[in-house]
């Protein structure tokens, strides 16, 4: 097992009945997990490491931000490279491991012309998928890349299946990285230290 996925989108109130899950509660979840499986890393999904700053993490091991394209969430107005660099910088400063997610069904810029699963969202083209997928899969600090989500209809579109295979090959060729990171000295970077963009949106 790679890790225990504790909770998804904890800081987004719309996912949890109008109230965000606090960092204290996330850490309590991780602590309870470690009481059952001490050696199994703990992960929190749908949240960028930059949004986890200001808390002293002990039992949470991994942040799991998701690239949702250049129009929404943490990728809004950014390139995949900027998204990668910002998340790596924050994860390192917080002593957390890093898993990347990639939203192929809703993370397009509209050039595909194919509606996503949410209103005003778009499916990615093969070119978009390849650009973002290779950037994230080849990130040395990240220990995994997950694509949201398995969808046969989407994978049958021209170029998608071959692109997924290309990303998988790149990830395999890169070799493994541990998901467990230990706290490091130094200050947590501010957004200006990375992409220069604001990091206040809690949605993934």
Image: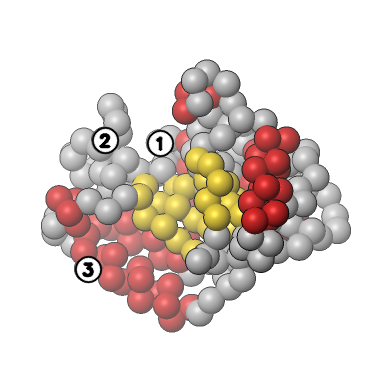
72 left or right, relative to 181:
left
Secondary structure at numbered mark 3? helix
State the CA–CA distance, disc 1 to disc 3.
Answer: 25 Å
Question: Which residue is disc 1 drawn over?
Answer: 71
4 left or right, relative to 111:
right
Question: Which residue is disc 3 drawn over?
Answer: 162
Q: Furthest-top residue in view?
A: 18
Q: Badge 1 local density, few (<14 within 10 Å), some, or many (20+)?
A: some
Residue at the (68%, 62%) spot, across then down: 38
Question: Which residue is disc 2 drawn over?
Answer: 117
Secondary structure at numbered mark 1? loop
State the CA–CA distance, disc 1 to disc 2.
Answer: 15 Å
Q: Which mark is residue 7?
A: none
Q: Does 26 appear above or below 168? A: above
Q: Nearer the viewer, mark 1 or mark 2?
A: 2
Secondary structure at numbered mark 2? loop
Residue at the (29%, 31%) spot, across then down: 118
Along the viewing direction, whichever of 31 and 165 lies nearer the viewer: 31
Residue at the (80%, 45%) spot, across then down: 56
């Amino acid at each position: 097992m790679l890790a225990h996925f504790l909770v998804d989108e904890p800081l987004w109130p719309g996912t949890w009945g109008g109230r965000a899950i606090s960092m204290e509660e996330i850490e309590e979840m991780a602590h309870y997990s470690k009481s059952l499986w001490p050696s199994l890393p703990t992960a929190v999904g749908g949240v960028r490491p930059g949004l986890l700053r200001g808390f002293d993490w002990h039992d949470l091991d991994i942040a799991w931000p998701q690239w949702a394209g250049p129009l929404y969430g943490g990728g809004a107005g950014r390139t995949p490279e900027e998204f990668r660099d910002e998340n790596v910088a924050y994860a390192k400063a917080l002593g957390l491991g890093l898993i990347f997610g990639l939203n192929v069904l809703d993370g397009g810029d509209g050039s595909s012309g194919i509606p996503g699963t949410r209103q005003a969202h778009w499916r990615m083209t093969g070119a978009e998928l390849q650009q973002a997928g290779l950037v994230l899969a080849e990130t040395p600090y990240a220990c995994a890349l997950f694509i949201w989500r398995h969808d046969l209809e989407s994978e049958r579109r021209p170029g998608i299946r071959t692109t997924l295979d290309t990303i998988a090959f790149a990830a395999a060729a890169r070799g493994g990285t541990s998901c467990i990171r230990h706290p490091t000295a130094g200050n947590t970077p501010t957004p200006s230290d990375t992409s220069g963009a604001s990091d206040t949106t809690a949605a993934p």
